[in-house]
Image (spheres, helix red, strand yellow):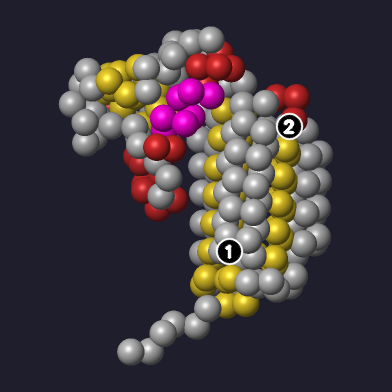
Amino acid sequence: MLAGVSSPICLFGAGGHGRGIAAQVARVTGRMPIFADESLPIGTAVAGTTVSFVKLDDIGAHPLIVTVGSAAHRRAIQERAYKHGLTVTHFIADVDRFFGNPPGRGSVVLSGAVVNAETQIAEGVIINNGAIVEHGCKIGDYCHIAPGAVIAGDVEIDSDVWVGANATVLQGLRICAHVTIGAGAVVTKSISRPGVYVGQPARRMEPTVI
């Protein structure tokens, strides 16, 4: 499902994440998207389609999703898109697995992911393939929930958080902004300090002193 789509959707960012989303958009809608990318010339073939634009202000009426994996870059580009007055949409690959509130602008919920009732997804969020976000969760702006991650019910995650592949965040916890949770980690306590957390149970990695 795409929100507010009339003309072909434009994906800004033709890297691996963008190519993956392009394939899912084509499957769901039956219509190939087009790409914009500031580092590739117009006409470059990408994932069965082409790069049509190199500048945000050329995109015009095409609904836009920023398909850049880096949260900081995704945020910067999406904020530029707002300044240009562009229509930023969202994408849900499997509508029959999505039971939450409508996602924010620029967010994507990819194939096999499950989002349960009363969950709120903010702007620029990636819920990646096969992730599970249970009931009543709040996922902040520009978060990334990686493939196979499980967010249990009533979890609140602030902005700019990366939850690694196959990681688990247990019921009712709070995760502050600017946290990275490593692949396979199990978060058993709320996190109030930014940093990288790994292990089972997850603990903050202290900087190495050289």
* Quadrant assignment, res 126: top right
Task: Pick out the residue farthest to the bottom.
Answer: 210
Q: Residue at x 41, y 50 (%)?
A: 70
**Percent of width and height locating residue 177:** 56, 63
Magenta span dominant secondary structure? helix
* Vertical relation: 166 (above or below) 34: below
**Percent of width and height locating residue 78:** 41, 39
* Quadrant assignment, res 167: bottom right
**Quadrant for the C terminus in the image:** bottom left
* Vertical relation: 36 (above or below) 181: above
Residue where numbered disc 2 is placed: 98
Where residue 210 is drawn, which disc sits there?
Answer: none
Task: Pick out the residue farthest to the left.
Answer: 41
* Quadrant assignment, res 36: top left
Density class for disc 1 (Cα within 10 Å; few <14, some 14-19, many ≥20) is: many
As measured in the structure, the alpha-carbon distance from the residue carrying label 2 to the one carrying label 1 is 24 Å
**Quadrant for the N terminus in the image:** top right
Dot 1 falls on a residue whose secondary structure is strand
Q: Is residue 188 visible?
A: yes
Residue where numbered disc 1 is placed: 181
Q: Residue at x 78, y 47 (%)?
A: 134
